[in-house]
Structure formats: C-alpha cells, structure tokens
Image: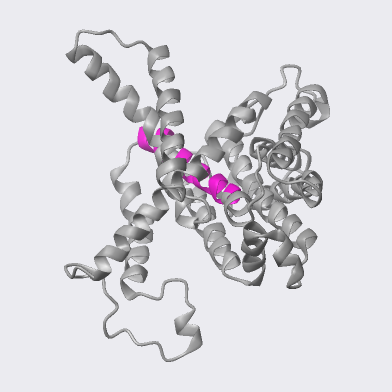
C-alpha cells in the first residue's frame, strides 16, 4: 500500500533513467545513509565496530568487485584473494617507501596495481572460459602466495614475512579509533558503490552483460570481447584491491600472506552466490550473511547445546559453520540462483501490488 509509484510521472529521459526512479527508494536510501553516518556511530560500541561493522563494510566492497566480474561479466574467478593481497602489499610499499604520501592516494595506487595484476591474469579469459578460466585465476592465487612469501622486497625485508602499518591519517585527521576507521571504510564504500552502480548501467556494463549471456552473439553485434573482458577484470580487481588495502591497513593493521589465502577467494565467491549474482545489492546481502553467521553461531550453538545437555566446542562451531555454508550454497543454486537480492526484489514487487491479487 505504501510502496507504489502512483502519481510519480516522468517528464524527461533523465528522470526516467535515474538510479532510483521510485521516490520511496530514494528516501529509503537517503535515510539509510543518514543512519549509517549519524545514528550507527552513536549506538555502536568498540566491539561492534571491530567485529561486525568494519569487516562488513570491507567485505561488501570486495564482494562488489567480485560481483562485477562474476555476476555481470560471467567470468568465473577464484583469484580474488590474490587481488586483495596485491592491493594490500602494493599500498603498504607505497605508504612505507614514500613518506608523507596521503593515505587515500596509497589506497588508490594499491587498487591500480591490483587492476594491472587482474588484467595480466585476465588474458586467458580471451581464449578459455568456465572451469578452465577458474583454474587460470586460481593460478594467480598460488603465484601471489609464493611471491609475497618468498620475495622479501614486498614485505620490506621483514624476517617473519608479516608487515604492519601505523600512523594513518586522512586529510590531517588521525585514523586510530574504531569510529574513524568505520567512517573511512563507509565513505569509500559509498563512493565506489555509487560508481559501480552507474558503471553497470552504462554502455560498458551492457557489454559485460552481453558477454555473460552469450559471448559469440555479442561479438556478432559488434561488441569487442577482449575489451569487455579485460575492462571487467580491471574494474573488478581495482575494487577488490582497494578492499584488500582497507582489510590490511584498517582491519588487521598487521598481516602476512596467509591473511589473503585461497580461503578468502572462496569466501568472496560464496558472498556473491548467496547474496545474488549480477546485483549490486547482492554484495551487501552476501557480506552481511557471511560476517554475521559465524557470530550468530558462536552465540546460538552453545545455548542449544546447553539446552540439550551437550557441550559444544569451538571446533564444533567452526565445523557447523562450514556445513551450513555448504548447505546454503547448494540450496541457493537449486532453489534461488539469484540469491537474497532476488528475494528482496520479489518482496518489493509484491509490495507494489498488495493487497490486490494481480
């Protein structure tokens, strides 16, 4: 009843093609941004910032980059963890070896290096696809693990292989408290999310979707597969690289190559599958699900075990998390391949018609 566009007339092409054509959506997004920037910091504790909000924002950004490549362009990738690692280590070296460089510039340059790395390992997509492309991107993951573990220059000659950053500042303001880290991640996510949303609605976004649906037919109508695929790898790797930089600089502070292992690549792919492939909103749904599920299981399973007189260990909780992840992925692939974003879209469509049966 309250979610209808009755009386909302479009009098120009610009009004008809805006991101949120329905007024209720525009107001909802505006209120969500106000709540994220103003209300959440007032109501959240340091634990909420460190354990939930900051990981959710960074993982949402990484899932957004993976979704551009996998969901919109249809190029299966298992090297997302490698792109995050390249972004993190590139930003680290730029930040350490160029004293005084702004933090934002270091993050952008780290994402640029990740984009170049993504283009390099995206070249096989011009000749192979499907499972073969997944194996090719998996090679990027193994190569990055070897590179950052064996070549000491990338870790600033650290004997242990771990690196750390400190003294972060943004436009003169120190980035030390959980609140300031949250605002930095949220601001970058909003900017890159808006750019990604506009990009997938543009001509290059339509080329990506044409390649995803049928690359041969796309080439017949004049779309250049090489340009479309490599730009998808570049944009996706850039966003993932920025997310990797934030993951190392803001969330971890100190990290080693194991922080960006192949497990991270699978976790990001799970976010896209559960959240919804080919949907910007799906990246946020998937990241929220992956971040919140372990916390919920850590709180819920011990209570259930105590209720039935069963002691639930920490390893049992981690095993249950993997079982639930696998079961949900299979369920979404069979029942709803478009994930939680499709369920949200269906709910909005029903609200537009409720209470009428048609």
Point out the stretch of residues depicted in magenta. 46-66
Q: Main secondary structure of the magenta part?
A: helix
- 224 or 107: which is nearer to us? 224
Residue 210 against residue 61 in the figure, above or below: below
Inspect this view and state whether residue 216 appears.
Answer: yes
Instruction: Name which residue lies at 57% across and 61% down.
Output: 196
Instruction: Name which residue lies at 65% across and 51% down.
Output: 236
Residue 137: x and y, percent?
72, 39
> Does 268 sit left or right of 135 as displayed?
left
Residue 134: x and y, percent?
69, 39
Residue 183 against residue 157 in the figure, above or below: below
The picture quadrant where one finds residue 304 is: top left
The picture quadrant where one finds residue 310 is: top left
Residue 299 against residue 223 in the figure, above or below: above
Residue 225: x and y, percent?
76, 61
> Does 23 sit left or right of 238 as displayed?
left
Inspect this view and state whether residue 287 appears.
Answer: no
Instruction: Name which residue lies at 30% across and 71% down.
Output: 24
Say whether residue 249 is magenta. no
Count of numbered tags: 0
Residue 271: x and y, percent?
49, 41
- 348 or 248: which is nearer to us? 348
> Does 82 sit left or right of 43 as displayed?
right
Q: Residue furthest bottom?
A: 11
Instruction: Name which residue lies at 69% across and 36% down.
Output: 82
- 283 or 106: which is nearer to us? 283
Say whether residue 56 is magenta. yes
């Amino acid at each position: 009843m309250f979610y209808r566009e009755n009386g909302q007339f479009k009098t120009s092409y610009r009004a008809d093609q805006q991101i949120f054509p329905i007024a209720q959506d525009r107001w909802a997004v505006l209120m969500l941004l106000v709540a994220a920037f103003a209300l959440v910091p007032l109501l959240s504790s340091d634990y909420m910032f460190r354990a939930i909000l900051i990981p959710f924002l960074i993982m949402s950004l990484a899932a957004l980059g993976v979704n551009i490549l996998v969901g919109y362009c249809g190029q299966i990738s298992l090297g997302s963890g490698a792109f995050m690692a390249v972004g993190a280590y590139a930003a680290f070296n730029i930040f350490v070896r160029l004293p005084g460089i702004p933090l934002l510039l270091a993050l952008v340059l780290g994402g640029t290096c990740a984009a170049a790395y993504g283009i390099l390992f995206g070249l096989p997509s011009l000749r192979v696809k499907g499972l073969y492309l997944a194996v090719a991107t998996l090679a990027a993951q193994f190569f990055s693990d070897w590179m950052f573990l064996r070549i000491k220059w990338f870790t600033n000659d650290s004997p242990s292989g771990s690196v750390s950053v400190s003294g972060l500042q943004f436009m003169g303001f120190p980035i030390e408290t959980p609140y300031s880290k949250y605002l930095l991640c949220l601001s970058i996510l909003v900017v890159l999310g808006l750019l990604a949303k506009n990009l997938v609605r543009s001509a290059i976004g339509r080329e990506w979707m044409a390649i995803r649906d049928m690359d041969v037919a796309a080439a017949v109508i004049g779309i250049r597969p090489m340009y479309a695929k490599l730009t998808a790898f570049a944009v996706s790797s850039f966003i993932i690289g920025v997310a990797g930089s934030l993951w190392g600089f803001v969330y971890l502070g100190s990290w080693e190559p194991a922080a960006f292992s192949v497990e991270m690549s699978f976790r990001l792919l799970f976010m896209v599958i559960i959240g919804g492939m080919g949907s910007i909103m799906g990246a946020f749904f998937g990241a929220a699900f992956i971040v919140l599920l372990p916390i919920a299981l850590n709180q819920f399973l011990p209570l259930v075990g105590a209720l039935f007189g069963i002691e639930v260990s920490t390893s049992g909780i981690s095993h249950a998390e993997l079982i639930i992840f696998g079961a949900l992925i299979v369920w979404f692939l069979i029942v709803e391949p478009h994930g939680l974003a499709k369920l949200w879209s269906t709910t909005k469509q029903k609200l537009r018609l409720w209470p009428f049966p048609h």
